[in-house]
Image: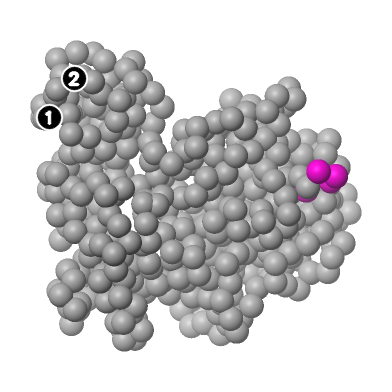
């Protein structure tokens, strides 16, 4: 869940290439009190092509992570582990840390290199806060006994129209009854029952506190005239496609949510295993936790904030639904795979435009593009990360036809390289900041659209 009020790292409530396994410990700042904050989530010059990695290539790293995760996470500064590629394009085990300079961490595990990544602690996330009829995707929503989260999508089963969001948004962490009101806006944003009821709770997947969970999801039945199938006009990506797609490593994604509005990000890890704290004692001690498996993680950290829980995550190209946002930290957002959620309720995304047309024939969305097409048919994706505190940006592109391409950072050509489809910009600066990139046919103005890397 994500809290709608500004926070440094919290989300309100409980967050293909091939397998990327992560085990992450989360502390949730969830609340079910209506007078509190709303609910919601928080390589090298020639890197190996992700699509070239077979499951067996990652196998030793996955086994090393699985073997050592429990022992590593006994250290309170280690909040998780994951498997991904290091700056040399090799499989590595990533350690998710609450801060820098954690002593006693290994450089290798069973011969696999280890990377340290400061993610901060993980929490749940819940401002498009006004009442609206029809209510657009991304607006405030909630059960009468919670604060507020996000209306994720309009979904249908052939007979009825529903709105999709999280269990902790519509079903109050299992404590709701079927038929309870769904308020738009949520209580934190002034919604009251029954005046602002937009629908009633129809079904939810109970959250188990003793076995693994695959989703934090619920649906409420509504009058179709009261819910739009799109984000607000001219504000975000528009209408999601009815054609879903599976997340893949480095895929470019976007969402429109209650608190942070329209944001873009990149799929960082897959097959994430997360321990989510639903009830806390003080800021750090967890009294009740639930484990979620097979989840998706997305960077950068400001992709979502408190109050964004329930947001639908779609691809940057084609608006194909990928996941349902539910939690996060200062560096990552977590999502349930959308197909698992839709299959559970027997519904599909209603990809009907406000004018009645169906955009469901969009791109399948799994190319990882981080920007729209520019003057040339070059698609560009960027991925920002740090190695020992030094900034690096991986660029990958497709569609260029010349033998060489120009790499342009912040309006200046920094390199002319062979058209291999991949390049790493070793900025090697410390701290934060953002950089804007384009890839152009060498010596021409035929370029990709801009893509921004943020640290």
Where residue 424 sits, quadrant-wise, is: top left
**How far across and down, in percent of the image, does residue 164 sit?**
70, 51
Residue at 27%, 49% in the rendered image:
52
Q: Nearer the viewer, residue 324 or 351?
A: 351
Where residue 193 sits, quadrant-wise, is: bottom right
- For this view, does 150 lie left or right of residue 18? right
Residue 274 visible? The answer is yes
Q: Is residue 297 magenta?
A: no
Residue at 33%, 67% in the rendered image:
82
- For this view, does 397 lie left or right of residue 349? left
**How far across and down, in percent of the image, does residue 309 sit?**
59, 56
Question: Which mark is first along the chain, 1 or 2?
Answer: 2
Q: Classify 306 as above or below 160.
A: below
Residue count near mark 2 (Cα–Cα under 10 Å), binned few <14, some 14–19, many ≥20: few
Residue 38 visible? The answer is no
Q: Which circle marks residue 287 in the picture?
A: none
Q: Which circle marks residue 402 in the picture?
A: 2
Q: Report the quarter where the N terminus lies.
A: bottom right
Q: Which circle marks residue 418 in the picture?
A: 1
**How far across and down, in percent of the image, does residue 379 sit?**
34, 29
Q: Is residue 160 magenta?
A: yes
Which region shows up in magenta? 158-162
Residue at 47%, 33% in the rendered image:
317
Q: Classify 100 as above or below 412.
A: below
Tell me which secondary structure the magenta stretch mostly adopts: loop
Where residue 443 sits, quadrant-wise, is: top left
Q: How many marks?
A: 2
Cα distance between the residues tagged 2 and 1: 9 Å
């Amino acid at each position: 869940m994500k809290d709608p009020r500004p926070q440094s790292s919290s989300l309100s409530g409980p967050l293909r290439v091939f397998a990327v396994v992560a085990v992450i410990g989360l502390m949730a700042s969830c609340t079910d009190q209506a007078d509190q904050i709303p609910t919601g989530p928080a390589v090298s010059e020639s890197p190996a092509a992700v699509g070239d990695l077979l499951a067996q290539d990652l196998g030793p790293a996955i086994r090393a992570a699985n073997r050592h995760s429990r022992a590593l996470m006994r250290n309170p500064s280690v909040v998780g582990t994951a498997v991904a590629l290091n700056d040399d394009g090799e499989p590595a085990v990533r350690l998710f840390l609450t801060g820098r300079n954690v002593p006693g961490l290994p450089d290798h595990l069973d011969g696999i290199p280890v990377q340290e990544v400061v993610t901060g602690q993980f929490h749940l996330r819940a401002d498009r806060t006004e009442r609206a009829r029809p209510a657009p995707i991304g607006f405030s929503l909630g059960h009468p006994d919670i604060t507020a989260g996000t209306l994720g999508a309009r979904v249908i089963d052939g007979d009825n129209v529903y709105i999709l969001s999280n269990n902790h948004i519509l079903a109050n962490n299992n404590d709701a009854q079927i038929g309870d009101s769904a308020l738009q806006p949520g209580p934190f944003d002034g919604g009251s029952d029954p005046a602002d009821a937009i629908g009633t709770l129809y079904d939810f997947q109970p959250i188990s506190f003793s076995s693994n969970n695959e989703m934090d999801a619920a649906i409420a039945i509504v009058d179709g005239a009261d819910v739009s199938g799109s984000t607000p006009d001219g504000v975000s990506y528009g209408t999601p496609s009815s054609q879903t797609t599976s997340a893949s490593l480095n895929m470019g994604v976007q969402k429109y949510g209650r608190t942070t509005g329209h944001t873009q990000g990149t799929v960082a890890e897959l097959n994430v295993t997360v321990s989510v704290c639903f009830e806390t004692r003080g800021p750090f001690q967890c009294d009740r936790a639930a484990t979620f498996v097979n989840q998706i993680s997305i960077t950068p950290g400001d992709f979502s904030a408190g109050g964004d829980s329930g947001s639908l995550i779609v691809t940057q190209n084609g608006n194909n639904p990928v996941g349902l946002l539910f939690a996060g930290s200062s560096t990552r957002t977590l999502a349930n795979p959308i197909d698992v959620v839709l299959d559970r309720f027997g519904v599909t995304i209603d990809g009907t435009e406000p004018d009645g047309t169906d955009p469901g024939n969009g791109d399948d969305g799994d190319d990882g593009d981080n920007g729209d097409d520019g003057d040339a048919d070059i698609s560009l994706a960027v991925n920002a990360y740090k190695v020992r505190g030094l900034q690096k940006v991986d660029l990958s592109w497709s569609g260029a036809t010349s033998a060489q391409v120009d790499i342009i950072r912040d309006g200046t050509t920094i390199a002319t390289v062979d058209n291999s489809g991949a390049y790493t910009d070793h900025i090697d600066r410390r701290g934060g900041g953002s950089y804007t990139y384009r890839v152009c046919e060498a010596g021409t103005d035929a370029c990709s659209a801009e893509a921004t890397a943020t640290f």
